[in-house]
Image (cartoon, rainbow, N blue to C red):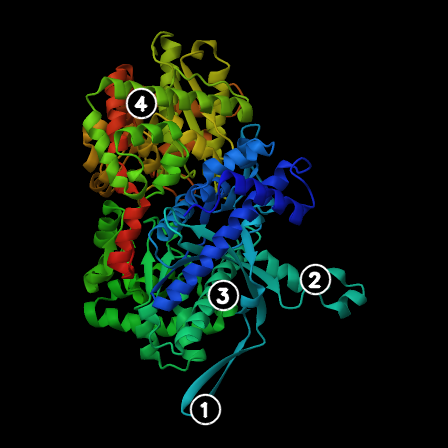
Amino acid sequence: MRPFTTETLEKTLTEKLMLNFSKTPDEATDQEMMKACALVLRDVMAIRGVETRKKTNREQRKRVHYLSMEFLMGRSLMKNAYNLDVLPQLKEALSNLGFKAGDIFEMEPDAALGNGGLGRLAACYLDSMATLDIPATGYSICYDLGLFKQKIVEGEQVELPDHWKDLGMSWLVPKPEEAQEVRFGGTLREFWDNGRLHTVNENATTVLAVPCDMKIPGFGTDHVNTLRLWEPRATSPMDMSLFSRGEYLKAAEEEAMAESISKVLYPDDSHEEGKSLRLKQQYFFVSATMQSITTKHMAMYGTMKNFHEKNVIQINDTHPALVIPELMRILIDDTGMNWDDAWAITTQSVAYTNHTVLAEALERWPQKLMEQRLPRIWQIIKEISARWQKKVDEYYHDPGKTQYMAIVWDGQVRMANLCLAGSMAVNGVSALHTDILRNDVFRDACQMEPWKFKNVTNGIDHRRWLSEINPGLDSLIRDLAGGDEYLSDAMALQKLDSYAGDKSVLDRLGEIKRQNKEAFALHAKKTRGVILDPNSIFDVQVKRLHEYKRQLLNVLHIIALYQRLQDDPNAITQPHTFLFGAKAAPGYVVAKRIIRLINSLEDQIAHDPICKDKLQVVFLENYRVSLAEVLMPASEVSQQISTAGKEASGTGNMKFMMNGALTVGTLDGANVEMNQVLGEENMFLFGLHADEVQQLKREGYVPQRLYTQNETLRRCVDALRTGFRDGVTYEDLYQRLLFGSGGSAADEYLLLADFASYCQAEQDMAAAYMDRERWNRMSLHNIARSGIFAADRSVKEYADNIWHVSHR
């Protein structure tokens, strides 16, 4: 039931302004009104949340606990109003009170609690779990600054603090009464009592974990779930004796140490202090979470023996892997269980989602660091490792496999192997990715325990990433596909396929895209100061900057187009705008150089009169959820060009598809499944397949041969050495492609191998674009067949096949 009418919203907002800010609507600022809106909606969600919890407790339903280092929530005001079915009423109420709804929504900062697809996926799943009436809680850290705010200064990325909490705290409710103590370091003392060995951690450093809860409402339901963010605090904020002696910094040392845990997401771990802080972050949120979950379970059931029957712990990549030894610690040390019983419960409670096959992301911790920072956890990991190793030995009788599958080996703790040993399920996030896990990365574990390995292809919140951000397209779908049915059942989008021969529908779809392009052009002019041509192809690559995602391949193709224009100013007849958005990890030097290169190329093309109205490159600063929400509806080409076998799934590809953009891509990640539902006639595929990539590397890949044989490629790569009008040259990238550097093989991600095929795919795409009816038909098919990539479908598969929880 809708909680407000326009009139009651006006009244409630006015009262909230008076009670919280002592102001009338005429006196309130936009910031105060934004906070008032948040508080009003938060009250509704809080009441529904209480009812949800009471119902869950009454029915003793199994709960899902979703642990992730990232939850890239973006802005919440419009999303929450949409799910609560009061968005039109809120907009009207704000207007009646003298405010512009657009200004109020724009005022809210992105909750930058994530980096990319991993965090955005987690946010989408929270929405779907609430919508499907699944009792669930997300857990992470209440980062002070999130990732970072990207600023481009003289072409280079500069990282600035992102103070999202200034207004974002309006959604958070601190729960100090549910705080947990987390212990680091200390020494272990063991003693026997009543026939049981007890282990006590003494002289540890204790940090208080205080929960701050954000409510997550479902769509079309009164069900409300929670995102619990842990905020670290010192147990003794100030040592007054030291302060009184004038030792001011030392007096606040404990407080500063605690606060450092939540200062930033993913501190640079290229040095010992960075590694130590990252390990502290992971154990801090895992320990606080498991203490909270088990305390509530004991309060309800009075026993831990049925814990696995009433709870499932889903860990999002290896970052929360310490949940396995931490649950063992609680069951053994706090509950008094023996090892075998505790291990049986743990391995029936925890499920692990793998999100990447990249070796750098399969975390490994130095054994010494684990011993020093987490002595009891280290003790438990050693025992898990010894038992797992014995199991592997007895199955394979192969020292090589034992070494590869070991949890502790050569002074390192391997978190992925810990997940394999301690989880009831291991899933990949696309069909291709899961096949690679089964047949390559985790081949030996899969052969030993094949029942554990499952696939759940990723999905996105289609209500947010289509209906909410693209009202023109939403209106068309409602007219063609039976009203709002698709909001609850994304597969209803298939009804659009039957209109592929209706020219009036295709023309209307083209006009909607044109209006979205014009809207984004206005946004770009306002925020970036750049003039975009809505008549040009909006060709977009926005995602985290990593070499395997191959933004550099895109750049090489643009250089080729630019050089064609130099040779023949009439070579390009259809204007082409390339839009990039990406953040590079602060310590990732090569990625930051590629950002610099994109900006050099943008500057070069912008100052060359030959390129006017033909070719343009724009780097979109500080790419984030709110920018994506404006960009996705306007995008016409989706660049999904990672090296085959490297991208686990992707979710940006799904958002583009759902908004009618056509994919230029490799058969990698979820592109494979997109191809299955679309057919090659509705995509522009290129490049080596995953098995061909492996074969080429086995045979010995020599990129210099391609460089020598292909004149177009050679000129593009040489341009990196020559540089551009800003005086910056890219000899380092040239060397990396042809000869390798820093321990990386030459052209490690096969850009040169796929270059010719990629250029041909772009050429085919540009030719298809000239036939507007054909293009719009392809776009319609992409939208119609995107329903399978809705997060609701993904969450139902988790619920049915891994969590074994009921849903609507």
Q: Amino acid at mark 3?
A: Ala
Q: Amino acid at mark 1?
A: Asp
Marks 1 and 4, how far apart at CA = 75 Å
Question: Which sits earlier in the primary sequence, circle 4 or circle 2?
Answer: 2
Residue occupied by mark 2: 252
Q: Quadrant of residue 673?
A: top left
Residue occupied by mark 3: 288
Residue occupied by mark 1: 193
Residue 390 in the image: state x and y as whole percent.
Answer: 27, 73
At mark 4, the secondary structure is: helix
Question: Which sits earlier in the primary sequence, circle 3 or circle 2?
Answer: 2
Marks 3 and 1, how far apart at CA = 27 Å
* Left or right: residue 65 compared with residue 374: left
Q: Amino acid at mark 4?
A: Leu
Q: Amino acid at mark 2?
A: Ala
Marks 3 and 4, how far apart at CA = 50 Å
Question: Which sits earlier in the primary sequence, circle 3 or circle 1?
Answer: 1
At mark 3, the secondary structure is: helix
Residue 509's disc is 4
Question: Which sits earlier in the primary sequence, circle 3 or circle 4?
Answer: 3
* Left or right: residue 512 compared with residue 139: left
Res. 82 visible in picture: yes
Name the residue rendered at 72%, 68% in the picture: 239
Q: Indicate whether 121 appears above or below 225.
A: above
